[in-house]
Image: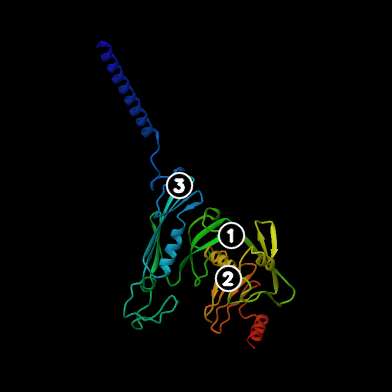
Amino acid sequence: MKRKILIILGIIVMLLIICGLVFYIDYENVSNNELPMSNVESSNNITINNDIIIIKDGKIQNENLIDTFIENSNNKQATKLEIDVTSNEKTDVIKLEYVPAEKNENQNDNLSSNSTVIINGPNQEFTYEDYQKYYGYYKMTKNEKEEKFDALHWNIKRLTNGNTVQVIFNSNTFDLAEIPVIFEYNLDSSLYKKTYDLTYLGRKDNGIKQIAKTNQFDNIDYGLYTLAGDVTVTIKQDKVYSLEDALKEKIISVQSILDQAKVDEKYGICEVAFYSDGGSIEYRYNDYTILKFNSLDGNRDLIIGMPGSIINNEQYTKINNAKEE
């Protein structure tokens, strides 16, 4: 009887020891494991907040918020943006706000971009404050210093030089000695993508060369031409193809040329010019221009030519007229 009691007590003691060990191991796991990542802090000690742009030593997070802010302001919608820039352990806090216009029924709708405009009678001058009220304005606060830019003379855009992307206040009205830079970051940390390079090599003649007929590749309703030059495509900085071969071997598509031009324009790598002929667009690079026709007469052709405006080039006009005949 005593032996049975001792066996039972031994079993109870062993169970208590096992339970104690299990509890101890679980406690250690809980205390030693890191908590799951949240929107508070990342592994490299950069605060994560999906509502603000964070730039640390040139590397940007939440870059997509720039596009949202620009799109909202272009659509005349109130919008805000905060940017925290950290470099050399110093942090600058930048706050941007777009404030829509406060229209007044008594104001003259025929206002121009002149610095002074007469409204509501000969003795009333249109001031900078009036521009801000009538057209809306951008407000920038950088380290508590506030500046305002009216939306008639200014807009916000990117400008890329080498590996540096600057977000700037841009003006097509004023000749600026210094461009107002809001903030900047490294291109290689951005969402910018480029899978190939186009190179335009000018010829001595000013002729037109057809690269693709309508519907030959993915160009369903337009032809592809080069003007006064030849175009090559470079992949991964070493493989070079003529434009014709790159299309035939499906290295690139015709649409990808336009898609890349749109991205380059967004990052300020090329300039864009719009035409009132129905919607034709030129993407103007330093070394060449890409023209996509969208005219009211039905012309949809894509042209790659020399730098500058090429929409009124005589050589192409002759060919286009001949097609219509």
Cα–Cα span, label 3 and label 2? 38 Å
Using the image, determine if residue 233 lies above or below residue 305. Answer: above
Quadrant the N terminus occupies: top left
Please give the residue where the numbered disc 3 appears in the rendered image: 90
Count of number-bearing discs: 3
Task: Return the residue at label 1.
Answer: 194
Residue at image position (58%, 66%) is: 256
Name the residue: 27% across, 14% down: 4
25 sits left or right of 200 in the view: left
Q: Residue furthest right?
A: 204
Tell me, what colour scheme is on the image? rainbow
Q: Amino acid at mark 2?
A: Tyr
Q: Nearer the viewer, mark 1 or mark 2?
A: 1
Residue 100 position by quadrant:
bottom left
Answer whether labels 1 and 2 touch (C-beta < 8 Å): no
Q: Are marks 3 and 2 in contact (CB under 8 Å)?
A: no
For label 2, the residue is 283
Distance between mark 1 and mark 2 Cα atoms: 16 Å
Task: Estimate the x, y position of residue 16 in percent, counting from the top left.
Answer: 30, 22
Q: Amino acid at mark 1?
A: Lys
Residue density around tag 2, few if under 14, some if 14–19, many if 20 or more, within 10 Å: many
Q: Which badge, 1 or 2, comes first in the chain's sequence? A: 1
Where 271 falls versus 193 (above or below)? below
Q: Nearer the viewer, residue 93 or 175?
A: 93
Q: Secondary structure at mark 3?
A: strand
Secondary structure type for disc 1: loop
Residue extending farthest bottom:
325
